[in-house]
Image: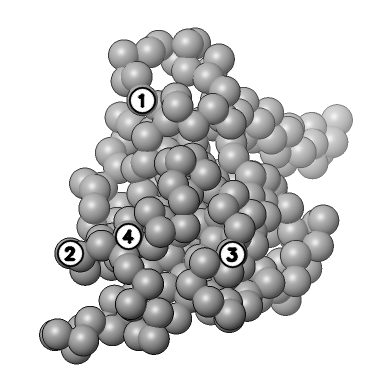
């Protein structure tokens, strides 16, 4: 269960810090964003999504002006997560790096791309089995599909987060067809698949931050951290 203290936006800063410290350790030398005490007891399914500015000719100043909520300004760069309710403080850093560096659809994110990135964290909840394959609402529900190909016996599995179908302008059938393709099936969805397909629906709590937002707050907290470390020395000198 997600409480206000388990805010996806707060967790975006932790995820961004994890990747930034991996790619640019000299620029981001300290862990200034920490998990809260309740995070150590929280188990939640989650996904981490990395997007990259669609226009990679923009300066850092221009990138700072991009709207993190305007999907037309961003391209997918990696997305991986888990449906298992695992420990938040271990799974978030793991999937932050896995989505950035090991999503097989893309090359690993390079240090030079860091400035162009937007990070999203989705906390998943309210999993329900649908009564039929269209028993979910576009824009509200994410879906997890399991389908067994009667010809090959292959089991295809895949998910789309709640925002995907709405952003793409898909209806239910188009969404399931796209999800089948994503899972490796080459045909189109038809209602004859009903008996061999299981669809679960779920909702998510999601937030985004850009590199500019992350860097601005990181540097502020880093300055505060250095100042706090310096205080005992100053007292000793006095």
Q: Marks 2 and 1: which is nearer the front?
A: 2
Q: Disc 1 and disc 4: Cα gap in Å?
A: 26 Å
Is 92 positioned to the left or the right of 42 in the image? left
Please give the residue where the numbered disc 2 appears in the rendered image: 186
Q: Position of residue 85 (x, y in %)?
A: 59, 78
Query: Whole-Å distance between the Cαs marked 2 and 1?
Result: 28 Å
Residue plotted at (44% across, 47% down): 170
> For residue 154, which numbered disc appears in the image?
none
Callout 1: few (<14), some (14-19), or many (20+) C-alpha neighbours within 10 Å?
some
Q: Nearer the viewer, mark 3 or mark 1?
A: 3
- Residue 152 lies left or right of residue 123; in this view the side is left
- Reading the chain from its start, which is encountered first: label 3 or label 4? 3
| x, y percent for residue 136 | 59, 64
Residue bearing the label numbered 1:
54
SS label for mark 4? helix
**How far is disc 3 from disc 1 in space, using C-alphas?**
30 Å
Residues under numbered marks 3 and 1 in contact, where contact means CB atoms less than 8 Å apart: no
Where does label 3 land, which residue?
136
**Callout 3: 10 Å neighbours few (<14), some, many (20+)?**
many
Above or below, comparing residue 34 to residue 229 in the picture: below
**Chain-order first, disc 2 or disc 1:** 1
């Amino acid at each position: 269960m997600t409480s206000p203290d388990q805010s996806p936006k707060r967790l975006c800063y932790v995820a961004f810090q994890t990747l930034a410290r991996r790619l640019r350790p000299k620029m981001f030398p300290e862990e200034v964003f920490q998990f809260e005490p309740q995070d150590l007891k929280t188990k939640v399914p989650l996904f981490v999504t990395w997007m990259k500015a669609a226009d990679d000719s923009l300066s850092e100043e221009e990138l700072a002006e991009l709207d993190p909520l305007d999907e037309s300004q961003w391209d997918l760069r990696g997305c991986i997560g888990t449906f298992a309710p695992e420990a938040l403080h271990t799974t978030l850093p793991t999937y932050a790096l896995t989505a950035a560096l090991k999503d097989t659809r893309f090359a690993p994110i390079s240090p030079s791309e860091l400035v162009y990135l937007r990070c999203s964290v989705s906390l998943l909840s309210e999993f329900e089995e649908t009564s039929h394959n269209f028993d979910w609402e576009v824009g509200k529900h994410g879906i997890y599909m399991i389908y067994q190909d009667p010809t090959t016996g292959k089991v295809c599995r895949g998910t789309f987060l709640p925002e995907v179908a709405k952003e793409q302008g898909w209806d239910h059938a188009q969404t399931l067809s796209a999800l089948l393709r994503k899972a490796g099936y080459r045909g189109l969805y038809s209602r004859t698949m009903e008996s061999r397909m299981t669809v679960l629906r779920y909702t998510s709590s999601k937030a985004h931050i850009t590199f500019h937002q992350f860097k601005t707050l990181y540097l502020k907290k880093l300055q505060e951290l250095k100042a706090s470390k310096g205080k005992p020395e100053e007292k000793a000198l006095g």
